[in-house]
Amino acid sequence: QIAVSPTLMVGVVCPVAHMTRVFVYGTLKKGQPNYFRMVNASNGQAEFLAHARTVEPYPLVITTKYNIPFLLNEPGTGQRVYGELYRVDQQMLDFLDKFEGCPERYQRTKIQLEVQDGDGEGEHTPRPGRFEEAFVYSKHEPAWLQNQTYESYDAYGDHNCWYT
Ligand SMILES: *[C@@H]1O[C@H](CO)[C@@H](O)[C@H](O)[C@H]1NC(C)=O
Ligand SMILES: *[C@@H]1O[C@H](CO)[C@@H](O)[C@H](O)[C@H]1NC(C)=O
């Protein structure tokens, strides 16, 4: 008989290192209208890692009557998109899935990123120039491919598309 401690059992079933990388490009970025949700501990943990840019171009459009930013899952068209890379726990990932209306409104897909700069502090901060993979909330919507694209979203920018 091998005695297995309850702590070890939990560690095997639910690995402690269950952290996920998420790339945000819209209203969840610092200074944007939904950033407060990223730093609300009731939603889980989110650690800012670095500014990053998509390796491939994607169409980032602002659309619907609410002026919501959407990254369209059509690599190769549009522009290389700037955003922020976070390390989140399972609770925050669950929150973001719910907040983004995944999988109906947005789908959570993987995306390749080039790190711009980190905060240089945390042990998980990647070096500038590194290539990283993260989840992103994107959408497949061919009808929006005609719309104007942006390389960086700013809800308070000069596009006159006020986020509501
Ligand atoms: C944080 O989130 C909780 C749960 O959604 C909410 O009740 C609370 O008002 C939020 N706090 C802030 C400061 O937004
Ligand atoms: C998106 O494009 C459609 C048709 O191409 C246009 O009718 C609509 O006004 C555009 N929306 C925005 C927000 O640019």
Image (cartoon, rainbow, N blue to C red):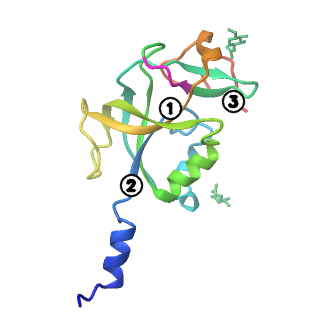
Q: CA distance from mark 3 to mark 2?
A: 30 Å
Identify which amino acid the numbered label 2 is placed on. Answer: Met
Label placed on residue 52: none
- Of labels 2 and 1, the one closer to you: 2
Label placed on residue 163: 3
Q: CA distance from mark 1 to mark 3?
A: 14 Å
Residue contact between numbered discs 3 and 2, judged by CB atoms under 8 Å: no
Q: Read off the magenta span.
A: 71-75
Q: Is residue 130 above or below residue 62?
A: below
Which quadrant does ligand 1 occupy? bottom right
Q: Quadrant of the N terminus?
A: bottom left
**Residue positioned 59% across, 27% down in the render:** 70
Out of 31 and 132, give the one closest to the viewer.
132
Which mark sits nearer the N-terminus, 1 or 3?
1
Out of 62 and 141, give the one closest to the viewer.
141
Residue labelled with disc 2: 19
Which mark sits nearer the N-terminus, 3 or 2?
2
Which mark sits nearer the N-terminus, 2 or 1?
2
Please provide percent x and percent y for residue 129. Answer: 24, 29
Q: Secondary structure at mark 1?
A: loop
Label placed on residue 25: 1
**Residue positioned 55% across, 54% down in the render:** 94
Identify which amino acid the numbered label 3 is placed on. Answer: Tyr
Out of 88 and 41, give the one closest to the viewer.
88
Please indicate, yes or no, whether residue 60 appears anywhere in the rendered image.
yes
